[in-house]
Image: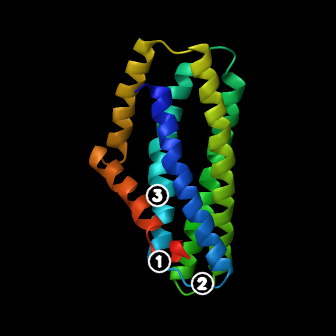
């Protein structure tokens, strides 16, 4: 495993989460009842797994390592702007969930932000995967750089509660995929 493939592997899980968010949004728009606890889990996974863990690995280690190689600085700047967009959508989703949980009719807003996040993450990971393929094609990182990045990624595990917490979040994605409302 190298650092680039590690990030691409994260994208597989993130896209599964994006599909869950899309299905949840579609069902909410169709007036299907979904347990608010499940939607809270989706929101938590967006915050902890996608933003704090995965984007943390990219922002704290990978992108700084790549910034001055092969004229990648503009690509990286664009990805950082997109990460901020994702954070803003996630924050609006979280605020809408709090409002809905407090008794306000925020169903449509929750559905809207779940859909927006799904669209965002699908497009964003496609762009990053093309970027990662270019990095691999150009062999832009040495084995030593990959090794150092993977060590830094371990720090990112610790930032979200350790390897066990990351495994728990991965299992939660699988649990959400198995919910009755996902099988419609």
Q: Which residue is mark 1?
A: 180
- Would you say 43 lies left or right of 69 here? left
Q: Provide residue 18's location: percent of width, then percent of height.
A: 58, 57
Q: Provide residue 40's location: percent of width, then percent of height.
A: 47, 70
Q: Quadrant of the C terminus?
A: bottom right
Which circle marks residue 168 in the picture?
none
Q: Is residue 152 above or below residue 10?
A: above
Mark 1 or 3: the one toward you: 1
Q: Provide residue 26's location: percent of width, then percent of height.
A: 66, 73
Disc 2 and disc 3 in contact, CB within 8 angstroms = no
Mark 2 or 3: the one toward you: 2
- Crowdedness of circle 3 by 10 Å Cα count: few (<14), some, many (20+)? many
Task: Give SS at disc 2.
Answer: loop
- Would you say 180 lies left or right of 21 here? left
Disc 1 and disc 3 in contact, CB within 8 angstroms = no
At 52% from the left and 77% from the top, the residue drawn is 181
Q: Which residue is mark 2?
A: 32
Q: Which residue is mark 3?
A: 45
Q: Is residue 67 visible in this depiction of the protein?
A: no
At 44% from the left and 75% from the top, the residue drawn is 37
Q: Is residue 1 above or below residue 181?
A: above
- Crowdedness of circle 1 by 10 Å Cα count: few (<14), some, many (20+)? few
Q: Provide residue 102's location: percent of width, then percent of height.
A: 52, 83
- Label total for image: 3
């Amino acid at each position: 495993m190298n650092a680039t493939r590690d990030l691409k592997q994260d994208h597989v899980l993130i896209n599964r989460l994006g599909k869950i968010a899309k299905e949840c949004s579609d069902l909410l728009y169709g007036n299907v009842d979904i347990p608010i606890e499940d939607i809270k889990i989706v929101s938590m996974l967006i915050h902890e797994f996608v933003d704090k863990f995965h984007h943390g690995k990219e922002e704290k280690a990978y992108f700084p390592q790549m910034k001055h190689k092969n004229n990648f600085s503009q690509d990286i700047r664009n990805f950082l702007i997109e990460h901020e967009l994702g954070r803003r959508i996630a924050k609006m989703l979280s605020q809408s969930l709090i409002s809905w949980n407090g008794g306000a009719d925020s169903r449509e807003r929750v559905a809207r932000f779940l859909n927006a996040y799904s669209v965002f993450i699908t497009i964003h990971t496609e762009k990053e995967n093309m970027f990662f393929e270019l990095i691999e094609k150009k062999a832009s990182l040495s084995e030593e750089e990959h090794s150092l990045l993977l060590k830094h990624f371990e720090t990112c595990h610790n930032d979200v509660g350790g390897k066990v917490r990351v495994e728990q979040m991965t299992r939660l994605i699988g649990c959400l995929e198995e919910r009755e409302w996902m099988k419609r």
